[in-house]
Image: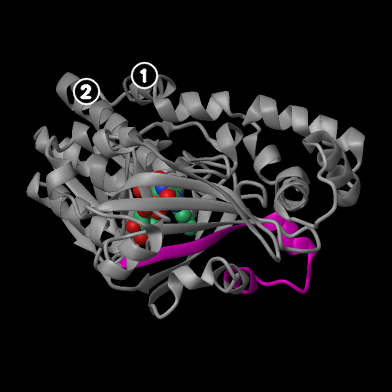
Amino acid sequence: MSEFDAIVVGAGPAGASAASRMASSGLNVLLVERGDPPGSKNVSGGILWGQELSKLYPDWEKSAPLERFISNKVTGFLTDDSYIGIDFRTKKFEKEKTGYSVLRTKLDGWLAKKAKDAGSTVITGITVDGLAWNDKRVVGIKQGNDIITSDLVVLAEGANPRIAIGEGLRPPIGDHDVAIGIKQVVKLSEQVINERFNLRNGAGMAAEFSLGFLKNGVKAGGFLYTNKDTISAGVVIDIAGLRKDNSTYSFNIMDQFVSHPYIAPYLEGGQLQEYSAHLVCEGGIDYVPKLYGNGYMITGDSAGLSFSNGMVIQGMNYAIASGIAAADTAIRCKNSGSYDLDQIAYYDNLMKDSQAIKDMKNFRGISKVTWSPMVHEFIPKFAESVLNGMFYETGEPKKHLMEIALGSLKETGYDRKKLIIEGFRLMRKM
Ligand SMILES: Cc1cc2nc3c(=O)[nH]c(=O)nc-3n(C[C@H](O)[C@H](O)[C@H](O)COP(=O)(O)OP(=O)(O)OC[C@H]3O[C@@H](n4cnc5c(N)ncnc54)[C@H](O)[C@@H]3O)c2cc1C
């Protein structure tokens, strides 16, 4: 007989959600987290999009440590000299809240406490080394010389899934499967943030930029999110591009972003509170492994469940959804008294129907667009040139937009054939 019905490895959004759901249905659950306290090892932008947590905690919007609701979404491009952005504000975002800025040190602590309050045993500061097997079936976890047994193991170890890879449950990580994320948290007063970003009544802003000022084929996106009295500023960097250029380091890109002439004023006078780095899953549906096997399920980032199109990153909501689906499968197994493979396969059925897998299938190959020279080189230069052509008063006779655009196109030096192919791909995949 196993010591636990289920052991969950990792108390991020996926693991803590799975543990809470199982424990509140009466399962005997162990949740193991290497960070002490939970969240201390974690990095997210982070905007928690969607309402996944309402499936676990109907009052979550009142009780969770949410920073600000997102009332305006900025998306744009930065070049050496310019900021080109669309700042979308709508009353709809104020009425029906669709995303909240969060800080993982606070959110993960809250999620782990919820899992504990639901009845899970939560151990922190312990890194699980591997899985225990018996006759090709996972029967628990290994830590040092100890084995703890369970009927099911839920792997929720995040974007660097060393156990899943080490145990041969998923392929190793390639350069195109993940990006490097770097983030700063900068402290300013709530009033200063409200004034700088034109916000009030708990409203917040989420901005993403393509960093068109990078050279030598290095590509990265930058983000700026407002919290209550801090700002999260960070970059997400394409590893393949970075590898090709020996002169740029990831921290250089971060420095360039936060010191850009139109980003630095937002952070001016702030005090650096956190500086962290983490992998971001970017591989899309082709990076998602088989989600289950004899005695185990893989959830969240460990399973590569993440979506990014350069204008938004979503992973926390998918992680929570997959944690809930894994928990519902475990509850079903427990109730039926069977942990056979066909029972565990229920998790796969639930996930096939989930927003995460549907989005990822629907946007297969999106990273070819998000990391394309078109998005990172052509569009920023072209847009800057067109806007200069339209708004820079020279005293010369004015030109029609078409004439300006054709001149700008020529100025970028971008190959027209390539432009048509990449432009078509962008329209189709974005
Ligand atoms: C820079 C950046 C910006 C992002 N922005 C956003 C955003 O704005 N919105 C969004 O939705 N998503 C965003 N994401 C993605 C999001 O953070 C992830 O998709 C999400 O955290 C995945 O949750 P998870 O529970 O699967 O994994 P994680 O949150 O990574 O949690 C995994 C947990 O497992 C623990 N762990 C790992 N190995 C072991 C072990 N062997 N033993 C014990 N514990 C272990 C870790 O310490 C960690 O607590 C961003 C990511 C980054 C890096």
- 294 shown above or below 367: above
Query: Tag 1: residue type?
Result: Asp
Q: Position of residue 255 (x, y in %)?
A: 59, 74
Helix, strand or loop at label 1? It is helix
Residue drawn at (28%, 72%) of the image: 189
Name the residue: 12% across, 39% down. Answer: 59
Question: Which one is in front, 108 or 172?
Answer: 108
Label 1 neighbour load within 10 Å: few <14, some 14-19, many 20+? few
Q: Please check the rendered image and state whether residue 225 is part of the magenta-colored stretch, yes or no.
A: no
- Up-down relation of residue 270 to residue 131 (above or below): below
Q: Position of residue 55 (x, y in %)?
A: 20, 31
The tag earlier along the polypeptide, 2 or 1, is 2
Question: Which amino acid type corresponds to the residue marked 2 in the rendered image?
Answer: Arg
Query: Which residue in the protein does label 1 denote?
Result: 342
Q: Which residues are magenta?
A: 230-254
Cα distance in 3D space between marks 2 and 1:
12 Å
State the residue position of label 2: 332
Q: Residue at x 59, y 67 (%)?
A: 257
Residue 253 painted magenta: yes
> Looking at the picture, how far across and down is residue 425, in whole percent?
73, 29
Q: Residue 34: in sight, yes or no?
A: no
- Look at discs 2 and 1 and give the one toward the viewer: 2
Disc 1 under 8 Å from ligand 1? The reply is no
Q: Is residue 391 left or right of residue 75?
A: right
Mark 2 residue element: helix
Disc 2 crowd, CA 10 A, few/some/many (<14, 14-19, 20+)? some
Quadrant position of the N terminus in the picture: top left
In the rendered structure, the answer to whether residue 317 lies left or right of residue 23 reads right
